[in-house]
Structure formats: structure tokens, C-alpha cells
Image (cartoon, helix red, strand yellow):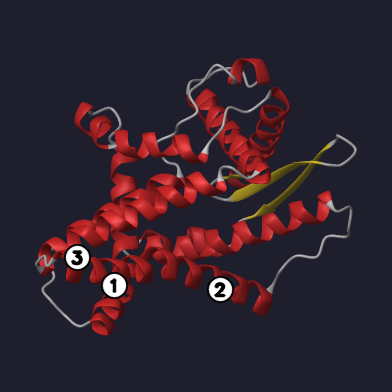
Amino acid sequence: MMRGSRAMALAMRSPTGEIEIHQEKLGPIYQSTWAKIPFIRGLVLLWDALSLGTRVLTISANLQAEEEEEQLEGRALTLTIIASLLMAVALFFVAPTGLSRLIEGWLQVGPNWGNVLEGIIRLAILIGYLLTIARMEEVRRVFGYHGAEHKTINAFEADAELTPENVAKFPIEHPRCGTAFLLTVVVLSILLFAFLGPMAIIPRIALRILFIPLLASVAYEYLRWTARHLDSSFVRLLIVPNLALQRLTTRPPDLEMLEVAIASFEAMRKQEIELAS
């Protein structure tokens, strides 16, 4: 899937081997005032991106099953996103808090060091989760398409001709990847929670959950800032961990994957130009 400022395009390889294109105009939220207010736009666009991502996964799955397209919409889509968010909160925020509290008591460390330990556990769970799902054949294929997206965008930004053979030469990492958002949220949580004092386990978990929107908003603004200052050697140094983590969520794509990514990008670009004119 490729998303621009006004349109998105999804390219899929059908069971017959043909590339099918689904494209649509993005919702008005992307051009609204809410999408321009710092520290609010991140939450608004993140929710819409989750909604869009869930729908395109449904479209793709239905195509592979050779069924009629039945998109998740309305209440079903909202419930799916909420369930996914709750699972993520439980895995990456509640579980690390509970584990660190147990280890604090065992090692007899102070609350500040306990908060740092919690952040380290959170980072370890994130990396362990990515390493675990990367062993699944279906996920490895998804990560291959993820790499194809990055290579295609890198090739376009270098003004290269978009052919599979050409695009294959470009880097698999990209500074504006969503993986960078995950790592940034985890690192910010370590820095923020390290300064919180001792508290009982229930308030401690509740506070972590309440801080998630703040962490997401700051992470979004940080990534926007780094994306605008990639010409700075200091910024390029800052994003090294983000690029390194992408090695876990991307795989070298084959030429067929690159062909699909290029088709998606070109369809998105064509619609963007039409909507802008």
C-alpha cells in the first residue's frame, strides 16, 4: 500500500498472477485543521491510519481467497481496531510494568532504577515479538513487501527510473518508516517513566496507559522533525537505531514484490496528480 497526502493505492498479486489495483481518495481528515495542529495531528492521523490499514488487509485477504470484497466498516472496523490496541497496550505496557515490579522486589532496587528496568523489558518484548513473528512464513512475505515499499520510495526520491531491477539497488531502510514510531515510543517511555516516583502497581499501570497518547504525540512530532532535517549529520546519527530496527520488519524483496510495490506507487502518484489539478 502506498499513501500520499490525498490518495492511497493498494496493489495485490491475485491468485492468477495478475496485479490488481484498489485506489481511493483519502478521507477529509488528512486535509483538516486537526491534521495540522502539533501534538494532536499525530493521534488523529494514527487512528485513521489504523483504520485504513485494517481495511486494506481485509481487501487483500479477500482477493487471495477469491471472495467478493467485504470490507470491515463501521462498528466492526472500530471494534477490530480497539481490540488490536488493547492487545498492544497489554503486551507492551501492562506486561513490562508487572514484570519489572516483580524483579524490583527480587533485586531490591529503587523505583527510579525499577522504571529504567521496565523500559528495558518493554524494549526487549518489542524486539522479541518482532523476531518471533518474523519466523512465520506469511509474516516474512509481508516483511518482503515492506522492504519493496521502502526501496520503491527511496528510488523515487532519488529520481531513478522505477523498474524492478533499478529499484532493487536501493536501500531497504527508510527514515519515515512506521517501525521508527514504535521504537521512538518505547525510548520516550523509558525517559519519561524513569523520573516517576514509587507507587502501587495499579496506579502505576493506570499512569502508563494514560501517558500513551502523550508518548504517541511526541513520537509523531519527533519523526516529523527528523524527516525534515535529514541533511543534518546529527539527525542522521539520531535515526541510526530506527533504521537498524527496520532490519527486523523488512526482508529483501524479489522482483515480483518490487513490481507490485511500483504498481501501487505509480497508481497513488497518478491519483495524487489528478486530485491536485
Residue 24, given in percent of the width and then of the height, sits at 69, 53
Q: Which residue is mark 3?
A: 193
Residue at 34% x, 47% y is 224
In the picture, which quadrant includes the C terminus?
Answer: top right
Give the amino acid type for the residue marked by disc 1 in the picture: Arg
Q: Who comes first in sequence, dot 3 or dot 2?
A: 2
Q: Position of residue 49 (x, y in %)?
A: 53, 58
Q: Secondary structure at mark 1?
A: helix
Residue 74 x, y percent position in the rendering: 67, 76
Q: Which of marks 1 and 3 precedes in the sequence?
A: 3
Q: Which image quadrant: the N terminus?
A: top right
Q: Give the SS element for disc 2.
A: helix
Q: Nearer the viewer, residue 59 or 242?
A: 242
**Residue highlighted by disc 2:** 83
Q: Are marks 3 and 2 in contact (CB under 8 Å)?
A: no
SS type, badge 3 = helix
x and y percentages locating residue 269 in the rendered image: 62, 37
Give the CA separation, mark 3 to mark 2. Answer: 25 Å
Separation of disc 3 and disc 1 at Cα?
Answer: 8 Å
